[in-house]
Image: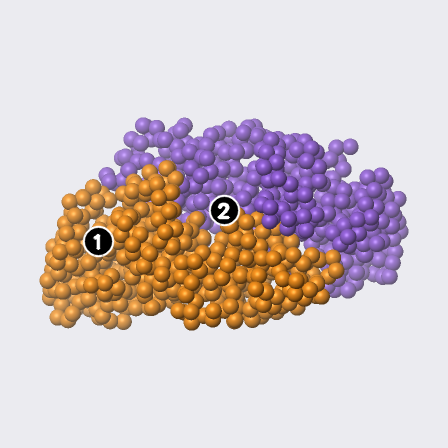
Chain colours: A orange, B purple
């Protein structure tokens, strides 16, 4: 059985049971059952030997009493009865169990966790968890998040998958990107990784037709060799971006105490990531910044960036970051320079960063973007438009969208400001141009489409982008 | 004459004239005059030989025709007549001229700029500019920003001064921090620095009673020796944080083309900043993050940070950043550990990061904060409160504010999320606890109160904070 076959039921089940469903509002088993009932389209069965009806639904004493087929279960019962529940699931033919319950190795109960692991390995079902938040899948409607609804927003449908070893990091980031308008395909918090491993989830989600980019927060993996092997396969299908925490000795000690992860030498991880074609993010912001660019923009055929700006200072900051990220400032062709000389004021320099000067109007942006599209020396574009000046106006957005429509070279847009600026950026985001407040942030994110080209040159063709 | 005496009229003038005031809406000379009229309390005279009244105010042909005293002028006339206008100002006894006009060295007219410089050096008035945005001072009501009002928000009154070599960086950042609710004392865009230099502005503003922190964006300075000498004086009064752009060879080339700055070797700048006691920011975000912490929080007596968290992952990320910033994780005393053991669940580790675990309630935060306040091994606190969990609630904010009230040790708060989280953070910001989305960002900002302690150990006493 391939990973896809063994993990698919978790994300595309036909039916589901919540074992430990509860009538009591505020209880985990109540929240999960209510969420699943609200958002999952197939049948959702509550299991609880002490209730006859929960939220109006007939409740079963055991998963074995459910008349229909049950593809997956969510288990939210005290840790000590999890093995018993799992044996019943095996008997019922359940394919996957997400064990939310905590109280295993993370609190010292190693033997109990080993028992769960053994059942998963022998009779099944496969287990995501234990000690996790489980799954949120915007396409199938799976929603196991047990946090109070007013405390956590759900992201909209999208093509970015997110795997998190830490439940808190996972839920926090989901809530945050929901507000930023970033879309998600699937989210998985896998807790102790008792059975299903990070690399299995990454490989499955990389191959998922609803996913275009896989993001992961991890503190350590359990099997370096298998990690490398499966991650290599994953990154050949879709980009995988990883934020690896515990990179310093202080962080690695903290990781050991948090998820019992052998964070391991950061150099070893760094080398493994490179070999596997994994893109490494420096922090949580970068993780999703890179994902936004990879999800919407074509890859860059090389590392030569053209910076277009109406503010010299933002140009200087961009140039600094381009060099720090081992990218290059593109050298414009003679033809491009001639074209630009005609429309720029006499005192402006035609160089890169291409400073359109403070009184730049949309026509100057148009000319610069035409040059950027045509000039073979340019692989990627960072366009900066500071809206505080008199001469710039929203027509610049039309020209950026015109450039973007070609899907020939990646483009990102950068502007800092308040309400007026936010409105312009929202227009671009809605049409697939990733936007950033600061130039450093934009350059770091843009690097992802340069790096991934080396791992998977055919990516654009596969997803129907022009070459 | 000290710098304070020579620069004070720019920020605390009794009267002001706008030379080149215009009747035509949208013109720079109209916007500046309207802004000054609206926000400056003293008399503002319009000067324009071709108008009799502007915005209802009697208009003068020349500054010499104004009957009363004129402390400073804003000059927004064509570059070529600036020297003539300045000579009239000298005759009138004007102390400071802010020259907004461009068309000097930056467009090749070096001789014209030299003429302005010579007048400033010999007869006066002193000149801020040329080719700049001038001054915004929230306390005296000086507002020379000529950007359209709907495009740029003004920050509220505050104690952070901001000096920017780049007008675009300056106005963009003002607009952005206005929306973030960060307060400003004075903002100065000094353009070509024809006369008044960056280090003079920094020294003056550091000594300004309305200012507690000086932030600067610069690409290069004109006189390294004087820069060092004056910056040393400035940093002994109030913290000075500098974002130096043009640190790479690509950035330095871009800076030369932007502000004709000799960006110089970054190592030389780095050494000079260290010697002068300047705190160096890595980017624009960090510049104001550090400023927020220095403006509101006491200094840290050492570099030992306690990280309190209800999410292990955020703890790991914090530990990584603490080490990367050359800070240390505090080792709690035996007494502190005993106290914490009593209130934490049996399986939780009493270590640092201090993981209060996912079901942490306000009482656990209270105990942790009490320990942080009392334990002599703790110099500074990063408190993380992820609000997506069930057990945490807004009472945690009361405990953080209780800690903050003592002004004994610096504290910053970190939480990522959407609306619910933002509301909690706003409560803290309003009461002087700096808040951050990401732990890395929080640690970087916290470093400022560790660094500045070395430069100016008496700072807290001087501003009335407890020792």
Q: Chain of mark 1?
A: A
* Front in this rendered view, residue A202 or B171: A202
Q: What secondary structure is found at the residue carrying circle 2?
A: helix
- Residue for point 73% across, 61% down: A345
When the figure is inspected, residue B233 is found, relative to residue B257, above or below; the finding is above
Query: Label 1 crowding class (10 Å Cα cut-off): few <14, some 14-19, many 20+?
Result: many
In the shown orientation, is residue A74 left or right of residue B11? left
Residue A79: image location, x then y, percent: 18, 50
> Are dots 1 and 2 on a single chain?
no
- Left or right of A150? Residue B157 is right
In the rendered image, is residue A356 in sight? Answer: yes
Q: Secondary structure at mark 1?
A: loop
Front one among B69 and B108: B108
Number of residues whose C-alpha sits closer than 10 Å to that of mark 2, classed few (under 14), some (14–19) or many (20 or more) = some
Regarding residue B185, the answer to whether it shows in the image is no
C-alpha separation, residue under disc 1 versus residue under disc 2: 43 Å
Residue A195 image label: 1
Q: In which quadrant of the rendered view does residue A140 lie?
A: bottom left
Q: In the image, is residue A316 above or below residue A185?
A: above
Q: Which residue is pictured at 42% across the width and 37% down the height?
A: B323
Expressed as whole percent of the image width and height from the top left, the position of residue B116 reads 82, 46
Q: Quadrant of residue A154?
A: bottom left
Foreground residue among B25 and A240? A240
Residue where numbered disc 2 is placed: B429
Of labels 1 and 2, the one closer to you: 1
Residue at (39% x, 44% y) in the render: B317
**Can you give x and y, in whole percent of width and height, for residue B73 in the image?**
79, 49
Give x and y (percent) for residue B207. 66, 35
């Amino acid at each position: 059985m391939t990973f896809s076959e063994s993990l698919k039921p978790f994300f595309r089940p036909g039916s589901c049971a919540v074992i430990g469903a509860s009538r009591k509002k505020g209880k985990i088993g109540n929240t999960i059952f209510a969420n699943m009932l609200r958002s999952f389209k197939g049948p959702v069965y509550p299991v609880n030997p002490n209730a006859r009806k929960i939220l109006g639904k007939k409740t079963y004493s055991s998963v074995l009493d459910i008349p229909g087929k049950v593809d997956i279960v969510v288990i939210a019962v005290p840790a000590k009865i999890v093995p018993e529940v799992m044996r019943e699931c095996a008997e019922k033919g359940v394919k996957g169990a997400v064990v939310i319950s905590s109280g295993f190795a993370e609190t010292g109960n190693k033997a109990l966790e080993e028992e769960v692991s053994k059942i998963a390995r022998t009779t099944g079902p496969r287990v995501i968890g234990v000690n996790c938040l489980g799954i949120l899948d915007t396409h199938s409607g799976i929603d196991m998040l047990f946090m109070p609804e007013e405390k956590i927003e759900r992201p909209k449908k999208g093509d970015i998958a997110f795997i998190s070893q830490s439940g808190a990091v996972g839920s926090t980031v989901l809530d945050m990107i929901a507000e930023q308008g970033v879309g998600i395909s699937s989210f998985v918090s896998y807790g102790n990784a008792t059975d299903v491993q990070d690399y299995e989830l990454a490989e499955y989600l990389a191959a998922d037709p609803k996913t275009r980019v896989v993001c992961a927060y991890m503190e350590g993996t359990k099997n370096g060799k298998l990690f490398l092997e499966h991650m290599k396969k994953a990154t050949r299908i879709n980009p995988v971006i990883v934020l690896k925490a515990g990179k310093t000795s202080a962080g690695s000690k903290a990781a050991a105490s948090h998820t019992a992860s052998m964070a391991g030498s950061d150099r070893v991880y760094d080398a493994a990531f490179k070999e596997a074609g994994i893109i490494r993010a420096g922090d949580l912001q970068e993780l999703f910044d890179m994902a936004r660019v990879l999800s919407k923009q074509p890859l860059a055929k090389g590392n030569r960036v053209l910076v277009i700006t109406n503010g010299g200072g933002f140009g200087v900051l961009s140039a600094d970051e381009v060099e720090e990220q081992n990218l290059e400032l593109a050298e414009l062709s003679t033809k491009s320079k001639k074209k630009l000389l005609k429309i720029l004021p006499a005192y402006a320099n035609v160089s890169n960063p291409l400073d359109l000067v403070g009184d730049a109007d949309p026509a100057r942006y148009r000319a610069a973007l035409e040059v950027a599209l045509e000039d073979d020396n340019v692989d990627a574009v960072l366009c900066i438009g500071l809206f505080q000046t008199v001469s710039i106006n929203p027509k610049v957005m039309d020209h950026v969208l015109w450039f973007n429509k070609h899907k020939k070279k990646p483009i990102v847009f950068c502007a800092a400001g308040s309400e007026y600026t936010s409105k312009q950026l929202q227009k671009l985001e809605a049409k697939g141009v990733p936007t950033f407040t600061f130039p450093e942030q934009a350059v770091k994110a843009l690097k992802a489409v340069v790096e991934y080209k080396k791992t998977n040159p055919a990516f654009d063709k596969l997803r129907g982008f022009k070459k």
